[in-house]
Image (cartoon, rainbow, N blue to C red):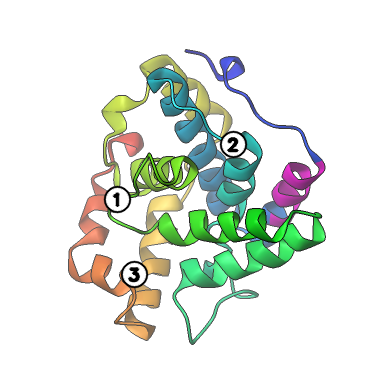
Amino acid sequence: MKLNDLVIPDTAACRGALEVAARYHTPSLLNHSVRAYLWAAAYARKQGIGFDAELLYVSAMLHDLGLTAEFDSHTVPFEEAGGHVAWAFCAGAGWSRERRQRALEVIVRHMWAEVSLEDDPEGHLLELSTGMDISGRRTELIPPGLREEVLARHPRLDIAKEFAACIAEQGERKPSSLAGGFVRSGIAERIARNPLDD
């Protein structure tokens, strides 16, 4: 499988979501967001999973906006803050209320331990791909040639150090959040051992 085999949707919403991600994310978080979509699309192609490419792409680009200074919330977990930003963004893009809600759900669920493929294919794919990219979970499912091509085009830069700091800070401020639980379960060590950094 090659990078050119993957469908990268070219819609106004997708172009806008990429622009927003590029404006507010660091280079490391931007590349992570792009890789999250690519790992998800590759897994779906390999497994024959049908999914809404536009919904997944927009959700992937916006899923970590709650970690940025401009969109950080002191009252809700970062994935919920990002989901609300996505809802507002998708309203501006002209999406229906139901489709906006789907973007919010996909983003919130990317932090879940597991998302049902049958109930939410896009949420399942984003939860899987962000786990691959951040903590190295199930990276053996990424085809080796594609892995090399994606990492060359969208390098990891400082994502391990940067994300570990972000999640630690979120966990300290919001100990009852999923981020807080991840910190207590040793996410920093899993990030440090991610095989994608080898």
Which residue type carries mark 3? Ala
Residue at (39, 76) in percent of width and height = 169
Residue sitting farthest toward the left = 185
Numbered disc in front, either 3 or 2: 2
Gap between marks 2 and 1 measured at Cα: 19 Å
Residue tagged 2: 52
Mark 3 Cα within 10 Å, few/some/many (few <14, many 20+)? Answer: many
| 66 relative position to 187: left or right | right
Q: Main secondary structure of the magenta part?
A: helix
Can you give x and y, in whole percent of width and height, for residue 172 in the image? 33, 82
Q: Earlier in the sequence, mark 3 or mark 1?
A: 1
Residue at (78, 37) in percent of width and height = 11
Residue 102 drawn in magenta: no
Gap between marks 3 and 2 measured at Cα: 27 Å
Can you give x and y, in whole percent of width and height, for residue 85 in the image? 65, 67
Can you give x and y, in whole percent of width and height, for residue 79 in the image? 48, 66
* Position of 43 relative to 196 (above/below): above
Q: Are marks 3 and 1 in contact (CB under 8 Å)?
A: no
Q: Secondary structure at mark 3?
A: helix
Which residue type carries mark 1? Glu
Q: Earlier in the sequence, mark 2 or mark 1?
A: 2
Residue at (71, 51) in percent of width and height = 17
| Magenta residues (range) | 12-20
Mark 1 Cα within 10 Å, few/some/many (few <14, many 20+)? Answer: few
Residue tagged 1: 114
Residue tagged 3: 179
Mark 2 Cα within 10 Å, few/some/many (few <14, many 20+)? Answer: few
